[in-house]
Image: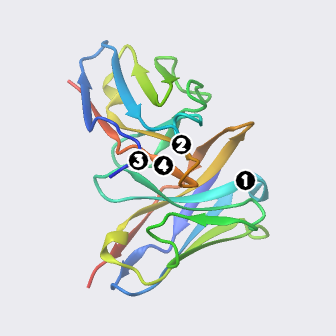
Amino acid sequence: EVELVESGGGLVQPGGSLRLSCAASGFTFSRFWMNWVRQTPGKGLVWVARIHSDGSTTSYADAVKGRFSISRDNAEDTLALQMNRLRADDTAVYYCAREGGGYGAYYFDSWGQGALVTVSS
Amino acid sequence: QSVLTQPPSASGTPGQRVTISCSGGSSNIGGNTVNWYQQLPGAAPKLLIYNNNQRPSGVPDRFSGSKSGTSASLAISGLQSEDEADYHCATWDDSLNAWVFGGGTKLTVL
């Protein structure tokens, strides 16, 4: 069974840093693109970052570009999101999501339970 | 402000059919497939419809999706109380080089 488990969330002051991790199991992690998606309480989903299956290519939403860094360790089946220079509007639940599909049709077919990040003084 | 536009709320009575719309543009819905996610209260999102109209294994056939031009729709027939959830549409945007979502629609079963 596919499982994604996030960890590392918590309370951090504005300007601070936090590193989220996502442990994957139940599938061949190295074959899939992976993503981070966040959700402000009571609001919609917002895509944050994406990484190629071999880690060679990354992309970011404009709101986090230059401050966040996505990475992966295919030997350990883990995904990470390093978040620097955090701001109050980064407060959200962060989900890791597996990108499945093929032949032009891609989608997030598995999601973690989410990790709450609160940026506040 | 979300790139894709969804109504913030929808409602129906048990047994009724409801539809939720998702509007975009040529760089997103117009050129790519649309996915829908169901998010039950307090839970993570779950894939509901992919590739415009395909259901993952385990999703009841009461749920169906369609796409036309730069808009997509999710239809739920035979509405049940357990369908009360938030529904999010999503697709890839070729101009932004990013995944984009709608703002989500909160479905209430009256």
* Residue A74 place in picture, x, y as percent: 77, 67
Q: Residue at x 59, y 36 (%)?
A: B31
N-terminal label among 4 and 3? 3
Read off the residue under disc 3.
B3
* Residue B68 place in picture, x, y as percent: 50, 23
Q: Are marks 4 and 3 in contact (CB under 8 Å)?
A: yes
Q: Are marks 3 and 2 in contact (CB under 8 Å)?
A: no
Read off the residue under disc 1.
A32
Q: SS for tag 1?
A: loop
Residue most toward the left? B110
Which circle, 1 or 4, is nearer the viewer?
4
Q: Residues within 10 Å of mark 2 (few under 14, many from 20)?
A: some
Which circle, 1 or 2, is nearer the viewer?
2
Q: Please name the amino acid that badge 4 sits on.
A: Val
Q: Quadrant of residue A96?
A: bottom right
Read off the residue under disc 4.
B100
Q: Are marks 1 and 3 in contact (CB under 8 Å)?
A: no
Q: Please name the amino acid that badge 2 sits on.
A: Ser
Q: Are marks 2 and 4 in contact (CB under 8 Å)?
A: no
* Residue B77 place in picture, x, y as percent: 39, 15
Q: Quadrant of residue B41?
A: top left
Q: Is residue A80 above or below residue B71?
A: below
Q: Which mark is residue B108?
A: none
Which circle, 3 or 2, is nearer the viewer?
2
Q: Please name the amino acid that badge 1 sits on.
A: Phe
Provide the chain ID for the residue under circle 4. B
Q: Quadrant of residue B109?
A: top left
Which circle, 2 or 4, is nearer the viewer?
2
* Residue A63 place in picture, x, y as percent: 43, 68
Which circle, 1 or 3, is nearer the viewer?
3
Q: SS for tag 3?
A: loop
